[in-house]
Amino acid sequence: MLRDYGRGSRARSRSTGLLLCSASALCFGLLGPFAVKAFDRGLSLNTVVGWRFGIAAAVLWLVVLASRRPVLGGRAMWQPLFMGAVLYASQTALYFAALQRLPVGLTALLLYTMPVIVVVISLVAGRDSPGLLRFIALGLSVGGVALALLGPGGAVSLSGVVLGLASAVVYTLYYLGMDTLPRGADGLTSSALVCTGAAGAHVGTGLLRQTFDPTPDPVGMVWVLGMALICTVAAISLLMVGIRTAGASSASMVSCLEPISAVVLGATFFADPFGMAQGFGAAAVVAAVVILGSRSVTASAPPHPEAR
């Protein structure tokens, strides 16, 4: 009886984690359209990213202090700072650089080759158990993204494709790093540390290269503010908690909802194509989310280390 209760509790926790990751993905999906608007106002990459993470870090630290969240030292502090300054800052720079060369949907597609990398690494390392439903969900999520993000015809920037794929590789390292945070690390504090590291990296680099604008265009800053509050504060916090309860590989596949939302927004605001293929792709990703949230998949996977 107690064993069944424990399994049911882990299943509910995992399902909650998947829902949090889904909400995070929808917030992240706004990032591309917001960034395009900010770049259209003439803001540089270091300016956009530096202000985005600087504002987000300030908001998160206010919440951490107001709610008296624990701020631990040692690896609980330096690991999120490192992840922000090196991994997240690099991934964001690569993604935005690709976004300046490619359509929003295609850029998101390249980034979301990441779930394949995460799941393969997790299986090889023994951090996840293989199962038929897990592979079906993986196929549906990846295939659905491919269908939903069929971009317009014509020439494609090779440098943009390389940058987008590089962003996916770095994002994989970031996901796996988040899955190894120390047991006592607070999710919200870790998010604040990640944003602090990323802001410091881009502001510092921008000042050295004279590519950071301390007084940017006000209209451009409206879009940056949206990126900071919606695509960063809300999205990172939800993702941090979701990954720790659902696991890296499941969370990465659920996050395929992000490019789906990016495609819808791209079709609405940037005239990106959205037809039958995109509709089938979106349905496939939703099906993958349902499969991942099912009891059979939850029971087949080992519990997340933090839940043991």
Image: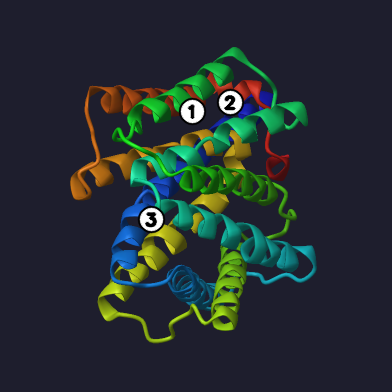
Label 1 sits on residue: 293
For mark 3, does the 10 Å Cα neighbourhood hold few (<14), some (14 to 19), or many (20 or more) residues?
many
Residue at 22% x, 49% y: name it: 270
Identity of the residue furthest to the right in this view = 74
Residue 294 can be seen, yes or no: no
Amino acid on which the number 1 mark rests in the picture: Gly
Identity of the residue furthest to the front in this view = 155
Front one among 234 and 278: 278
Q: Which label belongs to residue 31?
A: 3
Amino acid on which the number 3 mark rests in the picture: Leu
Q: Tell me the SS state at disc 2.
A: helix
Residue at 73% x, 70% y: name it: 72
Coordinates of residue 164 in the picture (x, y in percent)? 51, 46
Q: Quadrant of the C terminus?
A: top right
Coordinates of residue 169 in the picture (x, y in percent)? 62, 44
Are circles 2 and 1 on residues that touch, CB within 8 Å? yes
Coordinates of residue 18 in the picture (x, y in percent)? 49, 38
Instruction: Tell me if residue 193 comes above or below residue 266 in the rendering.
Output: below
Identity of the residue furthest to the bottom in this view = 215
Q: Quadrant of residue 45?
A: bottom left
Q: Quadrant of the N terminus?
A: top right
Label 2 sits on residue: 298
Q: Earlier in the sequence, mark 2 or mark 1?
A: 1
Q: Which label belongs to residue 45?
A: none
For mark 1, does the 10 Å Cα neighbourhood hold few (<14), some (14 to 19), or many (20 or more) residues?
many
Q: Earlier in the sequence, mark 1 or mark 3?
A: 3
Q: Quadrant of residue 42?
A: bottom left
Instruction: Tell me if residue 211 comes above or below residue 112 in the rendering.
Output: below
